[in-house]
Amino acid sequence: MTKSETGTGAGMALPDIAMERPDGTRVKPSDYLGRKLVLFFYPKDNTPGCTSEAKDFSALKAEFEKAGTALLGVSKDSPKKHLNFIAKHDLTTDLATDAETGGLSDELGIWTEKQMYGRSYMGMVRTTLLVDAQGRIARRWDKVKVKGHADEVLEAARSL
């Protein structure tokens, strides 16, 4: 049974778990109540797919704002790594670190066991959530393919 079948799918309230911003302040989903929120979870700063995804969302930030939607990228990378990632790629989307055990990505089943070359390890599954203004998950994209994804999420945000 997947997490979306057990309480983290469409229509369910998003767990209100705090994460750390690059500047050291805390952010949690309830900070966005009253407006829509896109949470895009990605594996690692400065890798090709993650960089493309963050740049795509950054390029569309003004369009998301017109749709009344905030953007927040989330990985387990440290706040310092996020600062470097933002500066290196001129990112305009907000980023947060979800490094604590039992964090939001753990609760949503996004931080999970993965396998590569016969080796098991824990990792972030590229996942995007569209959250409505009441803090409920309106849509979830699992195992995201980056190309065209930010545009698809923008259209969903506009229609919500």
Image (spheres, grey):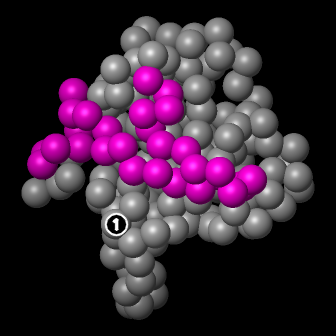
Front residue of 23 and 106: 23
Image quarter of residue 82: bottom right
Range of magenta residues = 5-33
Q: Amino acid at mark 1?
A: Gly
Q: Which residue is mark 1?
A: 102
- Residue depicted at x 45% and y 16%: 34
Magenta-colored stretch includes residue 20 = yes
In the visual, does 59 lie left or right of 153? right
- From the viewer's perspective, tell me whether residue 123 is left or right of residue 16: right
Q: Give coordinates of residue 105: x percent, y percent.
A: 40, 57
x, y (%) of residue 133?
Answer: 40, 18
Q: Nearer the viewer, residue 73 or 116?
A: 73
Q: Is residue 120 above or below residue 154?
A: below
Residue positioned 16% across, 44% down in the render: 7
- In the rendered image, which quarter contains the C terminus? top left
Picture coordinates of residue 13 (x, y %)? 25, 34
Q: Is 83 drawn above or below residue 147 in the view shown?
A: below
Neighbour class for label 1 at 10 Å: few (<14), some, many (≥20)? few
